[in-house]
Image: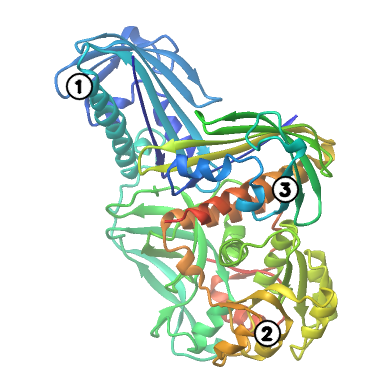
Amino acid sequence: MIKVYVSSVIEAPADAVWAEIRDFNALPKWTPFVAESRIEGGLASDKVGCVRNFRLKDGGAIREQLLTLSDYDFQCTYSILESPMGVDNYVATLKLTPVTDGGRTFAEWWAEFDCAPEREGELAQAIGQGVFQVGLDALKHRFRR
Amino acid sequence: MIRVTRSAIIDAPLERVWAVLRDFNSHAAWHPAVAESEIEDGYPADQVGCVRRFSLRDGNLIREQLLTLSDQEHVSTYCILDATLPMRRYVATVQLKRVTDGERTFWHWQSTFDVPRGREREFEQLVGVGVYEGGFEGLRAYLRRGRDRSGAGAPARARGAAGDLATHGVVVERFGGPEVLRHQALVAPAPGPGEVRLRQTAVGVNYIDVYVRAGHYPLITPPAALGMEAAGEVLDVGEGVAHLLPGDRVGYACPPPGAYVGARTMAVAQVVVLPDHVDDETAAAVMLKGMTAEYLLHRTHRVRAGDAVLVHAAAGGVGLFLCQWARSLGARVIGTVSSEDKARLARAHGCETPIITREHRFAAAVREATGGRGADVIFDGLGRAAADENLEALALRGHWVSYGQATGPLDAIAAERLTAKSATLSRPVLFHYTAERAALAEIAGRVFAALRDGVLRVEIRHRYPLAGAAEAHRDLEARRTTGPIVLLP
């Protein structure tokens, strides 16, 4: 099991950032790497248990299931059901915490998963820097003051 | 029950903040509201179960017990045992978390407790503002003054106490060729307010140094020392310097020139602390080019997986970094180079399609490599000679990022020529992206992380003594070097 952890500071209040990202089907709206996304089975996109089925701009297709959605903790946890990445038992969490000093947001995004040992470094880099950091950068950019 | 939560970002690495906060008796040193404090019964101040007895400046007395201390989670939990204040069942938790894209720390401080009915607001303010917010400011000031490092183990040199320090360096006597570089004795004065004095161990040589020496860029008035990039050790700091202390290993890449020296006194704003995994020579060799690649790929244009990226001079210093980093972001990297050897070098660094051209003719090849679409973004350090071909090679809504002008300054571009493709033209300069300290820390931090993770690989093949700077310039201008050049004072 390896863990990837990325965090950053976004120059906007946490409730405003949360409003942008709580919709489990909104990846194409706020990340630069998702081309299109839909929720399977006609469920609401904030229904815990729903599955998002999305396509990356580089072509990869991924299915992820929403496990936890908390408007109290500003937190969303999800697992990968299918992906071309070659990861198992992948569970990720995106969490926002208000920074009361300055009305900003501390954003954390982490994942735990299993993979072939020789791919750990490559996957940690691809997920940590290629996905999570890029996503947080997009939020920083969108909310820059 | 009242719950009070406050949080802040501290502009220091997590390890440094935690080293202070894990000491349960340290608050007397950094918290402005605490007058005196001691641990009862001679226990260590990081012993779970220990009790601190302290007085506030307003005269109140409090005893608190440490309940949890976790060096793993960076958590400290404690409760009030007795107080001259009417607070009951007070339990507080301090937690630190790392801000991974910059040398900063998130500090979360929360408590729950009861007070007499009607006094909730008063105590919410007392704890939230007086204790927690006051604590944030107190710790910031404490770190700024370097009080956490001034005890045992810290270097004994006093800040700014010494006078002039004799050193040596390479100065431009007048604008001209390499022959105008003269090695001579110099002096590094004691640092004034906002300044630091460094003993430099490695100095980076960049092509901009050649332009400055020749008088193309008006950055110096001869006689003056050259150089924009170096690494070394902090000797002493002036008044008001927050983030550096004697003994810190540091690096910088910034104007004004003056890096070709053994010891240097300079403004502190652009100097960053080096992580252990980046040695001095590497820092001196990569900071300017690495930070340039970082902001070009993440800030001027946010390169995404699948983007077609064209990198000019793909085997050059910045070019190789752009190729490696863009490739790791999932981009399709096309590059221009001037020879077969350089094409091989670029390919080995992630450039999938090197185009060999000495006349800067590449648009047709770029179109072919992208199925006719063109490049989504062009990183152009060439300038004038490539301008027309750049517009030709650009995809619809493409972004032409002109960050250098090796072949001469760009001629005026009629705005309609951008309209033809809804194109964007940017003329970014590194030092505008690093002007704010938080941004500098973030950019430098990402370069260091990229070195650690192997996203950027660098091999230093060319080392010269500082006195041999003229020879280094001759070799650089004659294209006898590949990769970074460092001077060793």
Identified at 48% across, 65% down, the residue is: B433
Q: Which mark is residue B56?
A: 1
Q: Are marks 1 and 3 on the same chain?
A: no
Query: What's the chain of the residue with tag 2?
Result: B
- Residue holding disc 2: B391
Q: Which mark is residue A37?
A: 3
Q: Are marks 2 and 3 on the same chain?
A: no
Which type of secondary structure does the marked residue at label 3 adopt?
A: strand
Total label count?
3
Q: Are marks 1 and 3 in contact (CB under 8 Å)?
A: no
Q: Amino acid at mark 2?
A: Leu
Q: Are marks 2 and 1 on the same chain?
A: yes
Work out how far the residue at label 2 is from the one at label 3, CA to CA, in angstroms: 34 Å
Query: Which is in the foreground here, disc 2 or disc 1?
Result: 2
Nearer to the camera, B129 or B462: B129
Residue B23 sits in quarter: top left
Work out how far the residue at label 2 is from the one at label 1, CA to CA, in angstroms: 68 Å
Work out how far the residue at label 1 is from the one at label 3, CA to CA, in angstroms: 57 Å
Q: Amino acid at mark 3?
A: Ser
Please report whichever mark, 2 or 1, sits nearer to the chain's N-terminal start. 1
* Colour setup of the view: rainbow
Mark 1 Cα shell of 10 Å, populated few (<14), some (14-19), many (≥20): some
x, y percent for residue B268: 38, 59
Nearer to the camera, B6 or B205: B6
Mark 2 Cα shell of 10 Å, populated few (<14), some (14-19), many (≥20): many
Residue B436 sits in quarter: bottom left
Identified at 65% across, 74% down, the residue is: B397
Nearer to the camera, B49 or A80: A80
Which type of secondary structure does the marked residue at label 2 adopt?
A: helix
Left or right: where B176 falls relative to B422 = left
